[in-house]
Image: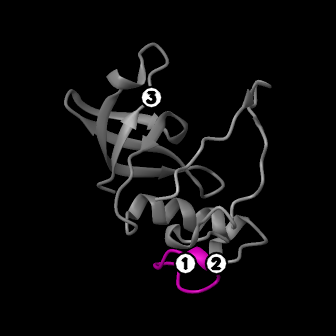
Amino acid sequence: MGSVVLIRDEKKPRMWWTLGMVVKLHNGIDGKVTTAQLETEKGLITRSVNHICLLEGSSHDPLMENISRQSQQHSPSHAHTSNDSEPPSSDQRGEIPCHEVSKKTRPNIDAIVTRVGRNVKPRQILDM
């Protein structure tokens, strides 16, 4: 509750989507969050969570914690098993911290293929 979200509208470009704030979450029959009541500048509306885009916020966002807690309960293999209030560290996610990334740790990729099938050349990073 209290999370700021963008309300998706297929008829408008993303720049013109409406901002809203989550007031209440509604669970479906299976116990998962399916809809949310949102407060916008025009009043209260109810939208499916499929039509809501969460804006990046703090790691202690209650809506994100609720959704991530539900996904953790329903996924059998989850590497992060410690306290749910703390986000997993970069080591647990398999990420390399930015200060440790160098040309030696980057994979040798000649070309990246997009989902449409176009080849994308890797960008050249200057050594400074």
User: Residue 81's quadrant in the figure?
Assistant: bottom right
- Magenta span: predominant SS is loop
Quadrant of the rendered image containing residue 72? bottom right
Q: How many residues crowd mark 1 within 10 Å: few (<14), some (14–19), many (20+)?
A: few
Q: Give the Cα distance between marks 1 and 3.
A: 31 Å
Q: Residue extending furthest bottom?
A: 82
- Looking at the rendered image, the disc whose residue lies closer to the viewer, 1 or 3, is 1
Contact flag, marks 2 and 3 (Cβ < 8 Å): no
Q: Are marks 2 and 1 in contact (CB under 8 Å)?
A: yes
Label at residue 92 = 2
Name the amino acid, label 1. Ser
Q: Nearer the viewer, residue 126 or 52?
A: 126
Residue toward you, 107 or 81: 107
Disc number placed over residue 8 in the picture, else none:
3
Mark 2 lies on a secondary structure that is: helix
Q: Which residues are magenta?
A: 80-91
Mark found first going from the N terminus, 2 or 3: 3
Where's residue 11, x and y in %?
Answer: 46, 13
58, 26: nearer the viewer: 58
**Residue lying at 56% horizontally and 63% vertically, measured from the top left:** 68
Query: Looking at the image, which residue is at 59% across and 67% down?
Result: 101
Task: Give the labeled residue for mark 1.
Answer: 89
Position of 71 with respect to 89 (left or right) is right
Q: Is residue 121 left or right of residue 87?
A: right
Q: Secondary structure at mark 1?
A: loop
Task: Say which amino acid is labelled 3.
Answer: Arg
- Image position, residue 67 (x, y; %): 53, 59
- For label 3, the SS is loop
Q: Label 2 is placed on what type of residue? A: Gln
State how far apart marks 2 and 3 are (Cα): 32 Å
